[in-house]
Amino acid sequence: MTRVFSGVKPTGHLTLGNYLGALRQWVAEDQHRSDALFCVVDLHALTVDHDPARVRRLSRQAASLLLAAGLDPELCTVFVQSHVDEHARLSYLLECVATDGEMRRMIQYKEKAARERVRGGSVRLSLLTYPVLMAADILAYGADEVPVGDDQAQHVELARDLAVRFNQRYGHTFVVPRVTLPKVAARVMNLQDPASKMGKSEDVGPGIVYLLDEPDVVRRKVMRAVTDSGSEVVHDRAARPGLANLLEILAACTGGDPAALAAGYSSYGALKKDTAEAVVEVLRPVRERHRELCGDPGYVEGVLRAGAEKARAVARPTVDAAYRAIGLLAPEEDVVPEAVR
Ligand code: TYM
């Protein structure tokens, strides 16, 4: 069976971008057709200036939201990254396979490091090595597929490169994963600035729809979305990015095609109104279920505990095999896998 792995980083409240770009596919498709693991990647939240209490709060909230969005612990494994030591164990080995030049070329590193420097802060070393930890997340589980939004494609590409390189140098150890992107809304843009991604780490902004926004807040944000000059409704990402973003959000929420949907509108106002209502309806059950789960923290904790146990059992043999393959001695009690003896 195909193995799927993906994750979400608790650096801010989850957004419509996270939902349409990733979560929705995990819920509707991946958990049903594959052996899937979904992770709140809390170690990644420590790569930028952080407040410990906030990371804890956001980690709990992200886990509840994954369940509220419809991940079913009977069908897939939901857990928190720091509960499974294998991520950090493998990350170090992969740092011994990756190069510093490779890390410095990562687009997200360049963007985030530049932002931190503008703020006058220092850049954490972990921000540079972050993609290696992400590769470890993926490779530890032998994932065949990694369903993510477009902004993570370069990181998954790196995980592929590291898997291939490790296998060539030290013998076949890792599955080489591939990225899977949603057909529409692989990159949801900020409603106030269609040139930038709708990102949860940014400051609270009128251009970001959060999964837990009340319906009226969602309506206001969508109705005030920046659109392009012109009046004809067409789907053209390059020339009309604001409009294209709304059409893609509507298409993702209703299951249509952005260009075909455009043909049905003669005004921006009507498109915005329908898009706002479509988003409200998509988020309504998530918000309601999240409210229920908040009243039952023991349930979420239980899911995460059981998830971590299952995840550990999957990752352990692969990471142990990598330790042996790269030349580290097995502790006596370890059973050395036949292939790497
Ligand atoms: P993160 O937490 O930024 O985002 C979680 C998922 O949401 C997608 N996404 C978007 N998709 C479309 N439009 C947007 N505006 C948008 N914003 C976010 C992301 O592409 C992602 O799929 N490094 C990862 C987390 C991670 C991970 C992993 C993912 C760590 N280890 C291993 C997969 C496999 C991240 O920061 O995602």
Image (cartoon, rainbow, N blue to C red):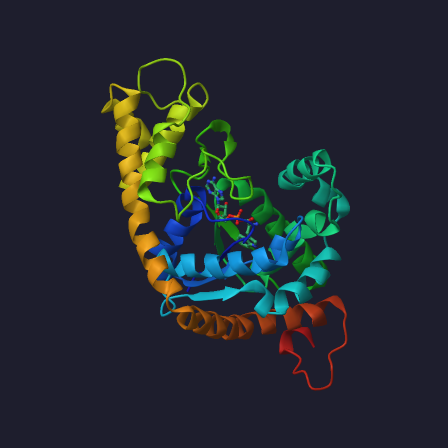
Residue 72: percent from the left, percent from the top?
A: 36, 64
Indicate left or right for 56 with 306 as reference: right
Q: Nearer the viewer, residue 327 or 232?
A: 232
Residue at 32 percent of width and 39 percent of height: 216
Q: Is residue 314 visible?
A: yes
Residue 198: percent from the left, percent from the top?
A: 48, 37
Indicate left or right for 173 with 224 as reference: right
Residue 333 placement: quadrant: bottom right
Q: Is residue 255 visible?
A: no
* Image quarter of the C terminus: bottom right
Residue 35: percent from the left, percent from the top?
A: 42, 65
Residue at the far left: name it: 264
Residue at 54 percent of width and 63 percent of height: 142
Indicate left or right for 124 with 211 as reference: right
Q: Nearer the viewer, residue 144 or 49?
A: 49
Residue 281 placement: quadrant: top left
Q: Nearer the viewer, residue 167 or 297?
A: 297
Residue at 25 percent of width and 25 percent of height: 270
Q: Is residue 10 above or below residue 324?
A: above
Residue 108: percent from the left, percent from the top?
A: 62, 40
- Number of marks in picture: 0
Residue at the far top: name it: 230
